[in-house]
Image: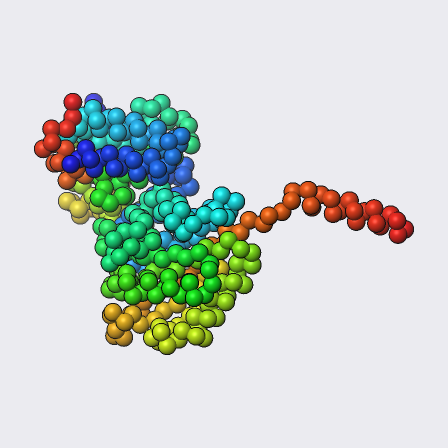
Amino acid sequence: MPKKYLDKIVEESQRVFGSDSLEWQVLSYFYGLLDKLGANFEGVTLGGVASDLNWYSDRPRRVAISSALDYLASRYPPLLVRRYELWGEDRQEVLNQPICTLSDDDIREALETNELINPVSGRAVPNFLDLVSVVYVLDEQFRKELSSSGGGK
Amino acid sequence: MTTLLDIGSLREQLKFYDDMGIPLLSVLKHISPASYEEFIDALYTDLDALIGSLEADAKDFAEAGEDVLNRELVRLLNARYYCASHDNDEGGHVDIHVKAPLKGFSWLGEAKLDNGPAYILSGLNQLVTRYARGTPGNNAGGLLVYFQKDRCSDRFQEWRTELEQDHKDSFEDLEVADCSRRPGLAFESKFVLNRIGSLAPKYQVRHIAVSLFRAAVDDNTYEKQPKRAKRSRKKGS
């Protein structure tokens, strides 16, 4: 089931961006990663992909990375989900666990008001742009199916 | 010590979107619109821009069929973070279906080549009788008309006039208004959807003209004309 579903997404994304596009190069890299790690795939960040592909200093390539990953996150059902996590200020000591996860709506409100309230303490978070991480993780339903079908090498 | 935040922070995410010229906030409005009105507003802004892309490449679409054009628009919408599909099973086969699945919002588009007002009317009828739900969050749609002949706005005006004058009885309590986003090339209509009745808000349809005319001009024509004019002035002087 996931293989068939993934094949459909691969085909569809190739059609959307074209096989000679930068976006397709990003997606090929991502599908390769997924094929290798299967259900063990933890997640990627835009900057992480840019570093892996050595594209960090090239603007059109950075743009292609956001377009490609957001495409996978905005289709339905999604393959990737954006996960926002709020980390403590002294992040070097508390890296093992984020304080909480945040939703698209939380982030939207924070960007509109330029203020993020820590849902746990009820206090405004200074420098929230640096303390919120954005990771693209596998959609949970897809991960379960991938797991049950023994995906990953 | 791991420093995942240095590379995956929200600040970094914002920089990536700044590179694209699309602020993250605007992307979040697509993904997680605060209201149906906001979803429709963002969709129309993007749809107009994407239609502009099609029109800029009119030479590639001057003879294309409805299906090719619809697929191209859906492809462009998908590349702009919309969850869009073509020929979705929505009580039949609607041409373009855009949704914000997390919020349960949807917009349906029916598209027709300009084969005259009667043919365009069949598209509007299809949209409102077969596909449109008219329930909250699903209360707006679009009728796209692809013009592959010249004088697009004049032809489009014929459709508007016919709708307003000859089909008032077919669309209960019909209201038609200009669309300031695309003057002469779009207009808005609202009417009671029979399926829902008159106590709910009227169903809204945005009618959009897409100009795909490519003039069959001999490239040399324009170069030759001024030369001829110059010569004739010389003779006359």
Q: Quadrant of residue A142?
A: top left
Give B184 or A96, whichever is nearer the viewer.
Answer: B184
Quarter holding residue B6: top left
In the picture, measured across the screen, residue A104 lies left or right of residue B164, that is left
**Residue lying at the far right of the rendered structure:** B237
Q: How many labels does the image show?
A: 0
Q: Residue at x 90, y 51 (%)?
A: B237
Q: Which residue is drawn at 41% across and 57% down?
A: B112
Residue drawn 78% across and 44% down? B227
User: Could you say where residue A112 lies in the image, as x and y percent from the top left?
Assistant: 32, 50
| Residue A69 visible in the displayed image | no
The quadrant of the image that shows the N terminus of chain B is top left
In the rendered image, the residue lying farthest to the left is A148
Q: Is B141 in front, or is A4?
A: A4
Write down the quadrant of residue B18 in the picture: top left
**One can see residue B171 in this view:** yes
Residue B63, given in percent of the width and then of the height, sits at 48, 48
Residues B4 and A144: in front is A144
| Residue B5 sits above or below residue B84 on the image | above
Q: At which x and y percent is residue B211?
A: 50, 54
The residue that appears at 37% across and 61% down in the rendered structure is B123
Q: Would you place residue A99 above or below residue A114 in this image?
A: above
Q: Nearest the camera: A47 or A90?
A: A47
